[in-house]
Image: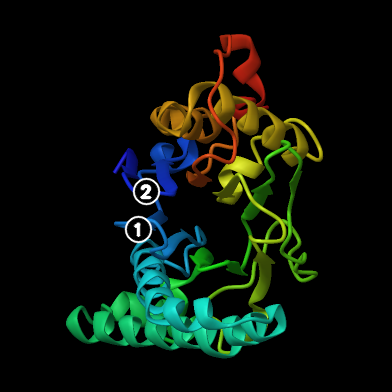
């Protein structure tokens, strides 16, 4: 897979995503190890779920492409099981507790089960078993992946994350923030992962009441995107620029350009790493007016 794009039509919310293989992966003949999933509503009020997973690139994670796919499938499946219950809640603390104790816990469980089924169907070779034995690796290690998930259930925006990557919440005025707490164990080289035995303890969460504080968009990106940005911090300018593009050109226009932006960040002039961008846009939060010149779109796509 060299790159991948998808966007789904819906009512109140628009969702889209794109992945591009990193130049460094192409150079060594490795596959794209990112994956994403989109669940859009059929009618206004239906739940919205997006997920993004990044398989680890180290040699010991030699099946991480599959692990990322399993993560996205588990996240979307589990989140949909819980949206009705989350939507019925009235207190953010209850939503936050359920997000970790129920949703994240079941995602981890489903992912471990998916790995077990995969190993049963496709056992490790003697060489792979020897490599795992040398490192003392469990059967989950080869499938290691990070995961970011965002869910809209009724009035609640619920975000969950394990590992690196970023979730950017953009408000209608163009202000942006990274709402999920920073994981102090991330050092730019190592990351927390679904493959670790205590994965649930490494999940972080964010809950926002959309009736109190509306959201224009949620942008989720793998670290291939973040590492390609020249500004530090990069997300305020990206949020402002994204809000302007959505307001002037609309979400469909932005969705058509996600593959180009992902490829630019994944190139040798960017991070060289697999890059995935997933976008949720709330229609009507920024009504389209006028048009945007190409020069005004530079911030979202700018890379090193």
Residue that appears at 40% across and 31% down = 252
Q: Residue at x 66, y 52 (%)?
A: 214
Horizontal and vertical percent for residue 36?
40, 55
Is residue 228 placed above or below 294 in the rendered structure?
below
Q: Quadrant of the C terminus?
A: top right
In the depicted structure, whether residue 195 falls above or below residue 288: below
Describe the element under mark 1 as helix, strand or loop: loop
Numbered tag placed on residue 248 in the rendering: none
Indicate the quadrant where residue 192 lies: bottom right
Residue 44 visible at all: yes
Residue holding disc 2: 11
Element marked by disc 2: loop
Which residue is painted at 34% across and 43% down in the image?
A: 7
Work out whether 45 lies above or below 133: above
Local crowd at mark 2 within 10 Å, few (<14), some, or many (≥20)? some
Q: Position of residue 91 (x, y in %)?
A: 68, 81
If you read the primary sequence from the N terminus, does the residue marked by circle 1 or circle 2 appear first? 2
Mark 1 and mark 2 in contact? Answer it, CB < 8 Å: yes
Q: Position of residue 129 (x, y in %)?
A: 35, 82
In the displayed structure, would residue 48 be above or below residue 266? Answer: below
* In-front residue for pair 287/271: 287
**200 sits left or right of 47 in the view:** right
Image quadrant assignment for residue 110: bottom left
Q: Position of residue 102 (x, y in %)?
A: 52, 89
Q: Quadrant of the N terminus?
A: top left
Q: Marks 1 and 2, Cα distance to the nearest angstrom?
A: 7 Å
Q: Which residue is mark 1?
A: 41
Tell me, yes or no, if residue 303 can be seen here.
no
Type of colouring: rainbow
Q: Residues within 10 Å of mark 1 (few under 14, many from 20)?
A: some
């Amino acid at each position: 897979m060299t790159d991948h794009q998808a966007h789904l039509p819906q009512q109140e919310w628009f969702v889209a995503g794109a992945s591009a293989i990193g130049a460094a992966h192409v150079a060594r003949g490795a596959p794209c190890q990112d994956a994403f999933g989109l669940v859009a509503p059929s009618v206004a009020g239906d739940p919205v779920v997006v997920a993004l997973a990044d398989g680890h690139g180290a040699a010991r994670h030699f099946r991480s492409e599959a692990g990322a796919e399993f993560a996205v499938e588990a996240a979307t499946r589990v989140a949909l099981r819980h949206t009705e219950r989350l939507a019925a809640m009235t207190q953010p603390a209850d939503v936050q507790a359920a997000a970790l104790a129920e949703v994240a816990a079941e995602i981890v469980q489903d992912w471990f089960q998916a790995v077990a089924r995969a190993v049963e169907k496709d056992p490790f070779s003697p060489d792979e078993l020897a490599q795992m034995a040398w490192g003392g690796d469990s059967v989950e290690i080869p499938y290691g992946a990070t995961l970011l998930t965002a869910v809209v259930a009724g009035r609640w925006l619920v975000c969950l994350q394990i590992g690196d990557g970023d979730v950017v919440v953009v408000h209608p005025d163009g202000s942006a923030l990274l709402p999920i707490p920073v994981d102090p164990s991330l050092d730019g080289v190592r990351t927390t992962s679904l493959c670790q035995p205590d994965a649930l303890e490494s999940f972080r969460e964010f809950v926002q009441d959309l009736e109190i504080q509306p959201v224009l968009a949620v942008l989720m990106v793998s670290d291939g995107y973040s590492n390609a940005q020249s500004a530090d911090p990069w997300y305020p300018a990206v949020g402002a620029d994204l809000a302007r593009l959505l307001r002037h050109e609309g979400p469909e226009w932005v969705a058509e350009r996600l593959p180009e932006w992902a490829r630019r960040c994944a190139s040798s002039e960017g991070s060289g790493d697999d890059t995935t961008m997933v976008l949720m846009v709330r229609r009507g939060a920024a009504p389209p007016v006028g048009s945007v010149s190409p020069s005004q779109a530079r911030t979202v796509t700018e890379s090193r």
